[in-house]
Image (cartoon, grey):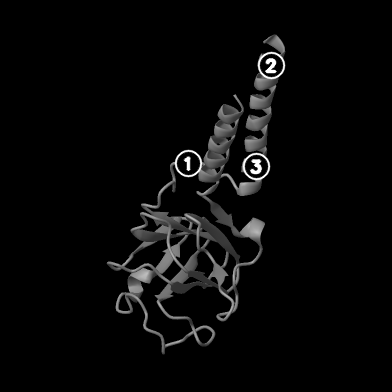
């Protein structure tokens, strides 16, 4: 019986860890995303990132050291229901070496700036850009989104398309998963104790 309980406990731990693997990073909870080119926020391990800008020019520097298994592309979205907001996206396989405009880097899709420049307003509140990962590219990826001509609250998101667990399993941070695991272990212990008393 002890081995059965131990095996069940092991399964509970494995399940709680698997559920916790799909995660969303929200700037309002995390704190300001990287506003310096040399200290980008690490987005590695997240399938969804949500950030915002409040009526001002703003840079959000980030990096992905690697991507979740199955990821085929990153989808960027800008949302603004007010008078208007512009957001420019820049991506590179090498770190930025200066703030704002670093033209020395080898930039992905450098010739398609119009696709990487998003605009949203009250009449057309959402704009999107999809970056397809090059064949065999596993990272790292460095980038920033730059808000400008922004005169009302706006938000952006980055979603890893194809990531295992992304959009299918509700994100459960590890601290929240632990009580679930402990509750399961407690229930199994109670059942085991009841069986011993009835024997």
Q: Mark 2 points at which residue?
A: 196
Q: Where is residue 113 in the image (x, y as percent from the top left)?
A: 35, 75
The structure residue drawn at horizontal position 63% and vertical position 30%, both measured from the top left corner, is 184
Secondary structure of the residue carrying numbered label 1: loop
Label 3: few (<14), some or many (≥20) within 10 Å?
some
The structure residue drawn at horizontal position 47% and vertical position 54%, both measured from the top left corner, is 47
Q: Is residue 197 left or right of residue 84?
A: right
- Establish if 196 lies above or below 22: above
Front of the two marks 2 and 3: 2
Q: Is residue 9 visible?
A: yes
Q: Where is residue 75 in the image (x, y as percent from the top left)?
A: 40, 59
Label 1: few (<14), some or many (≥20) within 10 Å?
some
Q: Mark 1 points at which residue?
A: 169
Label 2: few (<14), some or many (≥20) within 10 Å?
few
Q: Is residue 132 left or right of residue 166?
A: left
Identify the disc placed on residue 20: none
Q: Give whichever of 22, 156 is nearer the camera.
A: 22
The structure residue drawn at horizontal position 52% and vertical position 70%, both measured from the top left corner, is 62
Q: Distance between the residues labelled 1 and 2?
A: 37 Å
- Establish if 62 lies above or below 159: below
Task: Compare marks 1 and 2 and give the one earlier in the sequence.
Answer: 1
Circles 1 and 3, Cβ within 8 Å, touching? The answer is no
- Establish if 125 lies above or below 13: below
Task: Compare marks 1 and 3 and give the one earlier in the sequence.
Answer: 1
- Establish if 187 lies above or below 175: above
Q: Give whichever of 77, 54 is nearer the camera.
A: 77
Q: Mark 3 points at which residue?
A: 178
Q: Distance between the residues labelled 2 and 3?
A: 27 Å
Q: Quadrant of the C terminus?
A: top right
Q: Give whichever of 177, 9 is nearer the camera.
A: 9
Q: Can residue 153 be seen in this view?
A: no
């Amino acid at each position: 019986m002890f081995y059965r309980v131990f095996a069940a406990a092991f399964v509970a731990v494995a399940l709680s860890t698997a559920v916790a693997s799909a995660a969303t990073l929200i700037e309002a909870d995390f704190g300001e995303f990287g506003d310096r080119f040399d200290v980008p926020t690490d987005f590695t391990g997240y399938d969804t990132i949500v950030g915002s800008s409040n009526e001002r020019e703003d840079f959000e520097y980030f990096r992905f050291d690697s991507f979740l298994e199955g990821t085929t592309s990153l989808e960027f979205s800008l949302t603004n229901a007010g008078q208007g907001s512009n957001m420019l996206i820049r991506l590179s396989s090498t770190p930025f070496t200066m703030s704002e405009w670093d033209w020395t880097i080898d930039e992905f899709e450098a010739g398609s700036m119009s696709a990487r420049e998003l605009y949203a307003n009250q009449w057309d509140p959402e704009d999107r850009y999809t970056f397809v990962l090059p064949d065999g590219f596993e990272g790292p990826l460095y980038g920033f989104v730059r808000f400008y001509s922004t005169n009302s609250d706006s938000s952006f998101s980055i979603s890893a398309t194809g990531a295992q667990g992304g959009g299918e399993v509700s994100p459960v941070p590890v601290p929240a998963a632990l009580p679930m695991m402990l509750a399961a272990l407690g229930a199994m212990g109670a059942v085991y104790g009841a069986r011993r008393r009835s024997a």
